[in-house]
Image: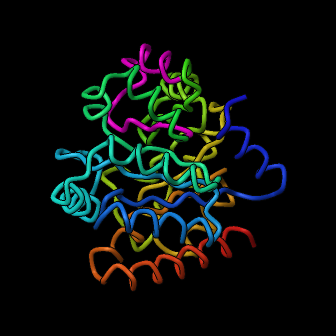
Amino acid sequence: MAGLRKLLDKLKNKGRTAFIPYFTAGDPSMEWTDKFLKTLASAGADVVELGVPFSDPIADGPTNQRAAERSLRAGTTLADIIDFIERFRREGNKTPVVLFSYFNPILQMGLEAFARRAREAGANGVLAVDLPPEEAREYVRVMKAHKLDTIFLASPTTPPERLRLVDKASSGFVYYVSRMGVTGARASLSDTLREELARVRKVVKKPVAVGFGISTPEQAREVAARSDGVVVGSALVSFVEKHPPEQAREKMRELASQMVAAIRK
């Protein structure tokens, strides 16, 4: 059994839903990426998604797009992020890390080189946002060969037959996009999310983590009741945009702690 799936199943057996925060690596610097990750881990993150900045982030809303731009201006590369994970592991940190990337940076490094380097560094899984499972056979083979979990996206418009394909291609968990559109904090959850997740769970056998638009502890609690993982991104990323790094870190800690408390009630 793959590592991330085993972790989420273990939490489920304990009656817990995983808290999975996301932020963009290299925003505003890799030094702060280290501090943000450790802060989120200490606040109770079960898995952390590290965003790989990309110049054409089609799945990301304005908040994450601006974070990617700041990170790219700071000179962040995929190799820098993998090197960071290696240092993070060398210090003895155990928090699972998923690389949330577009396929282009991975392809630029080379599938084999990326997978080998990421696994050696200590990454646990990869989500290539714009890579459809229909075109991911070689990618899945290489990631599996290097013991990296794969994660694919499903959405409200994904039909049952494609849900089965997403489920089969995903070894860690299936990432369910809670509403149509791009990432970004929302004032409310989709009115149909409950029914959609019930539909998904009839088909998908792997754990299901839900993201896109979750920004408050109340929303996280509601999603946690119907999923195996709650992904929170833009609400955390916005702190980096609006505040100096030290203040952003404290606000991340506060919101993450509230989220963890909410989903574990």
Asked whether residue 15 is drawn in magenta, I would say no
Residue 105 against residue 212 in the figure, above or below:
above
Quadrant location, the C terminus: bottom right
Q: Residue at x 38, y 24 (%)?
A: 113
Residue 145 against residue 44 in the figure, above or below:
above
Which colour style is shown? rainbow
In the displayed structure image, the side of residue 52 where residue 69 appears, left or right = left
- Residue 196: percent from left, percent from top: 55, 46
- Residue 117: percent from left, percent from top: 44, 31
Quadrant location, the N terminus: top right
Residue 191 against residue 128 in the figure, above or below:
below
Q: Residue at x 48, y 54 (%)?
A: 211
State the image quarter where residue 71 is shown. bottom left
- Nearer to me, 70 or 211: 70
State the image quarter where residue 64 is shown. bottom left
Asked whether residue 139 is drawn in magenta, I would say yes
- Nearer to me, 60 or 188: 60
Q: Which residue is drawn at 37% across and 48% down?
A: 81
- Residue 227: percent from left, percent from top: 65, 52
Q: Tell me how many marks there are.
A: 0
In the displayed structure image, the side of residue 192 where residue 179 appears, left or right = left
- Residue 187: percent from left, percent from top: 40, 74
Residue 232 against residue 226 in the figure, above or below:
below
The magenta span reads 124-143
In the displayed structure image, the side of residue 227 where residue 30 appears, left or right = left
Q: Residue furthest right?
A: 14
- Nearer to me, 224 or 97: 97
Q: Which residue is drawn at 59% across and 26% down?
A: 147
